[in-house]
């Protein structure tokens, strides 16, 4: 008997990187990660990574220039958005980033009620209770904070490494700790308002924040959510 499992290509287009994954049944596997600017300038780099993949394509892009490239590469691709009914009720006014929609759908495949902290270029915290989006919070990501301190002051250095969250004895250590504690504190504040909800951490800086907040690390949550979106739109 022929398998009816959905096989699809998943593309998560972020501000910094484009992550490419493959959905096979219930499993999501990361294939490649490419700098966003390189994909915009040389789209063939992405095509080289997928090796002539044939099948459904799901896309979540938050970069308009990248979205244009991806629409040209995959004219039949399904772009994640708030169009139509979704498995989570999201009464959002205006446009919501495709990555946020995908993360919420990915989180909903694990829990009915949860908090997501997406820790990338921006820090985005979203809350879902009983399958309904309750609201979110957006603040600068860790590296954006570090860069702004460098650009907005005369003497503070830009911190590249973000690991130390203990009180610092050097300026760079103090900046590291301040940034991580600031983001960790924001997450903890949201958790105190919604006690008992599982916390899901995702994004490039999730590992650095985890020691301060605990929770569940889901490395490729956005890809998982894109897969959920494709399955739901396909009636599965």
Image: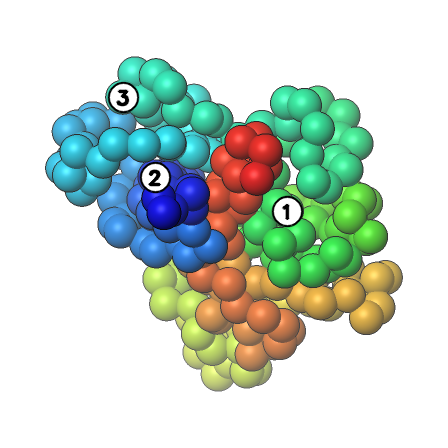
First along the sequence among labels 3 and 2: 2
Which of marks 1 and 2 precedes in the sequence? 2
Residue 206 sits above or below residue 72 on the image: below
Q: Which disc is residue 104 wearing?
A: 1
Check disc 2 and report its element: helix, strand or loop. Answer: strand
Q: What residue is rendered at 62% in x and 76% in y?
A: 214
Residue marked by disc 3: 73
Q: Is residue 40 left or right of residue 205?
A: left
Q: Are marks 2 and 1 in contact (CB under 8 Å)?
A: no
Residue at which label 2 appears: 9
Q: Can you give x and y, in whole percent of width and height, for residue 180 in the image? A: 55, 67
Query: Crowdedness of circle 1 by 10 Å Cα count: few (<14), some, many (20+)?
Result: many
Q: Secondary structure at mark 1?
A: helix
**Residue at the image point whose x is 22% and y is 36% from the top:** 53
Classify residue 157 by image quadrant: bottom left
Q: Count the numbered circles shown.
A: 3
Please name whichever residue, 59 or 146, is drawn nearer the observer in this view of the structure. 59
Q: Earlier in the sequence, mark 3 or mark 1?
A: 3
- Residue 99: tell me if it is visible: no
């Amino acid at each position: 008997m022929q398998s009816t499992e959905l096989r699809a290509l998943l593309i998560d287009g972020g501000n910094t990187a484009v992550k490419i994954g493959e959905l096979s049944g219930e499993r999501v596997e990361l294939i490649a990660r490419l700098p966003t600017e390189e994909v915009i300038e040389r789209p063939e780099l992405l095509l080289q990574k997928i090796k002539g993949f044939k099948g459904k394509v799901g896309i979540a892009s938050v970069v308009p220039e990248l979205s244009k490239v991806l629409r040209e590469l995959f004219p039949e691709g399904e772009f994640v958005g708030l169009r139509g009914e979704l498995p989570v009720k999201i009464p959002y006014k205006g446009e919501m980033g495709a990555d946020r929609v995908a993360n919420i759908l990915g989180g909903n495949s694990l829990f009915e009620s949860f908090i997501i902290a997406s820790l990338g270029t921006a820090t985005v915290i979203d809350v879902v209770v009983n399958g309904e989006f309750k609201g979110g919070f957006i603040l600068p990501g860790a590296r954006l904070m570090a860069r702004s301190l460098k650009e907005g002051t005369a003497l503070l250095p830009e911190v590249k490494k973000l690991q130390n969250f203990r009180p610092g004895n050097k300026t760079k250590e103090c900046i590291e700790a301040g940034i991580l504690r600031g983001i960790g504190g924001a997450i903890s504040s949201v958790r105190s308002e919604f006690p008992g909800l599982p916390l899901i951490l995702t994004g490039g800086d999730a590992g650095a924040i985890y020691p301060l907040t605990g929770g569940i690390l889901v490395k490729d949550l956005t890809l998982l959510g894109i897969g959920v979106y494709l399955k739901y739109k396909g009636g599965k």
